[in-house]
Image (cartoon, coloured by chain):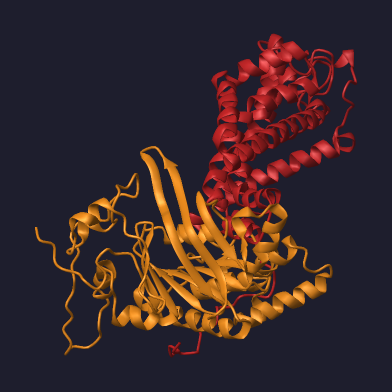
Amino acid sequence: MSKIKTSNNQEEVKAVSKKKRSPWVEVWRRLRQNKSAMFGLAIIGLLVFCAIFADLIAPYGIDDQDLRARFITPSRDYLFGTDNFGRDILSRIIYGSRVSLQVGFIAVGISALTGGALGAIAGFYGGRLDNVIMRFVDILLAIPGILLAISIVSALGPGLQNVMIAVGIGSIPSYARIVRASVLSLRDQEFVEAAKAVGANDFRIISKHIIPNSMAPIIVQATLGVAGAILSAAGLSFIGLGIQPPTPEWGSMLSSGRQYLRDYWHIATFPGLAIMITIFALNLLGDGLRDALDPRLKS
Amino acid sequence: MQERLLEVRNLKKHFNTKKGLLHAVDGVNFFINKGETLGLVGESGCGKSTTGRVVLRLLEATDGEIIFEGKDILQFNKQQLREMRKEMQIVFQDPFASLNPRMSLSEIIAEPLVVNKVFSDKLEMQKRVKELMDTVGIAERLTNAYPHELDGGRRQRIGIARALALNPKFIVQDEPVSALDVSIQAQILNLMDDLQDEFGLTYLFISHDLSVVKHVSDRIAVMYLGKIVELSDYNSMFKNPLHPYTQALLSAIPVPRIDIKRERILLEGDVPSPINPPEGCRFYGRCQYRQEICRQKTPELRDMGNEKYVACHFTGDLRPASE
């Protein structure tokens, strides 16, 4: 075999740092440039902080009733006013963030894990298994989410745990479909074939090659899903199927404030604002993550 | 006679499609001697990449035998298959798709070692990764870089390093340079040549680029629509092609000299569909020497002496069709 002459002055790759710069670091750098996403992240950070240190921050206890101080409009002593039992609304909202975040994250955890696993199995193995799983998902999808949640809660009975399960099951289909779609496109990639060629088993291929590469859409969906889950849980509580009073949950606070809406606007308004701002922040972060994870928008 | 490392007998791979049975590989026979490079050429869709993958059992063969070091690997169970994977590796066409974008270069190169639990000591594994990077000419400071930070040529070097990690005897090169610039192509081809000498590797080199195949191969197999039509050593293939398809193919190689006028054989029509192909010679519809027998009987690969094999009824006796 003859040698082809090549010039050996290969240009050096420009400034590749020795430091490990994983693609996730790159994503974080891009996310930081997005002001509205960072704003959303800050609000969520504040919320998490409130939830963790509720005991220290809240000026009054959850159930401290002061019947002499009922229906007080926002003032210096009671920043958000008090309700019909004389409970401080600000304190209850701060404690309520615990419940809401718990519901949001755990419900999304349930649906992302089950939905993701179902989708990954369906996409990776294909054939009959794929058909069975996806038809099951289609059945779930055919039932409106809130209706499904209502029927599950009425079957299991109200309560924090059951609300999380109900809301979680309702959003399994979207995760299953997203994961299946990205697994389908990744399954035939050459790097998966290369892993097969060196003898990697299915578990390693799915966990090391397929899942890390299909994380981007799941993260976006999960962030937006937390917002949806909080809203669904609040909705269920509002119609009396969710978390029961006296637990301070934003949806049920909103619901109990409803009767006094005409005379005392603040009882329903502040829990409503809390829900709204949380959802808004999560949506901003979700949108920002979607942009940051999209390689086509690399700047 | 040289020692045969790999022999493929009557290999078939059919795919079920909605339109019918797709005969991607349809009765392929060839062998590769130890330390040599067999070039496998053919136009796109003729089944050459499928052949490469079936030989490594990345796709399951429909029928046939693949004898590697005296054993039929199609009969291997899971355990034997794992052992076999250490001996046979593949370098892929697209260096952008064949490296996992979420893994650093050292993780990619180390994967075969991790999967097969070659080293129990982490430091020793890192030493081996460094050694491999050095072998393929990748600077050590790129250990923790990610594939997207590299150009195509360097990525392909990583792909080669991964294939070498387990010290294989045989490597399928699935169009390893067709996605690269010409100048980089030469570097990669030279690298593979060096590695072949250094480690005594045997290559199955799949390509549609005749000039590349001409450069690297000891022997060449020409594929057309799932079948090998001609198989011979490098010299006799280019000096004296016997199959009408090979003749047409070789006449298409540009000659970079202005005073030589090439006579091109222009083929009429298109490649027929590999779905439910009819009996007879696959090349029948486009051959200028076709006779009645070509339509009725499929020509088998015949030994023409000197390790030259041709699948044509009229080898050495081609007369233009009478129609």
**Total marks drawn?**
0
Image height of A134 relative to B143, above or below: above
Image side of residue B265 versus residue A213, left or right? left
Q: Is residue A272 shown to the viewer in this render?
A: no
The spot of residue A299 in percent (x, y) is: 50, 61
Q: Residue furthest left?
A: B323
Image side of residue B233 versus residue B160, left or right? left
Residue under the point 70% across and 62% down: B83
The image quadrant of residue A86 is: top right
Nearer to me, A232 or A217: A217
The image quadrant of residue A94 is: top right
The image quadrant of residue A279 is: top right
Image height of B146 relative to A136, above or below: below
The spot of residue A115 in percent (x, y) is: 65, 34
The spot of residue B202 in percent (x, y) is: 56, 75
Nearer to me, A70 or B255: B255
Image side of residue A21 versus residue A163, left or right? left
Quadrant (top left/top right/bottom left/bottom right) for the N terminus of chain A: bottom left
- Shown in orange, the chain is B
Residue under the point 75% across and 33% down: A106
Q: Is residue B261 shown to the viewer in this render?
A: yes
The tint of chain A in the picture is red
Nearer to me, A228 or B9: B9
Image height of B275 relative to A232, above or below: below
The spot of residue A269 in percent (x, y) is: 67, 22
Nearer to me, A64 or A173: A173
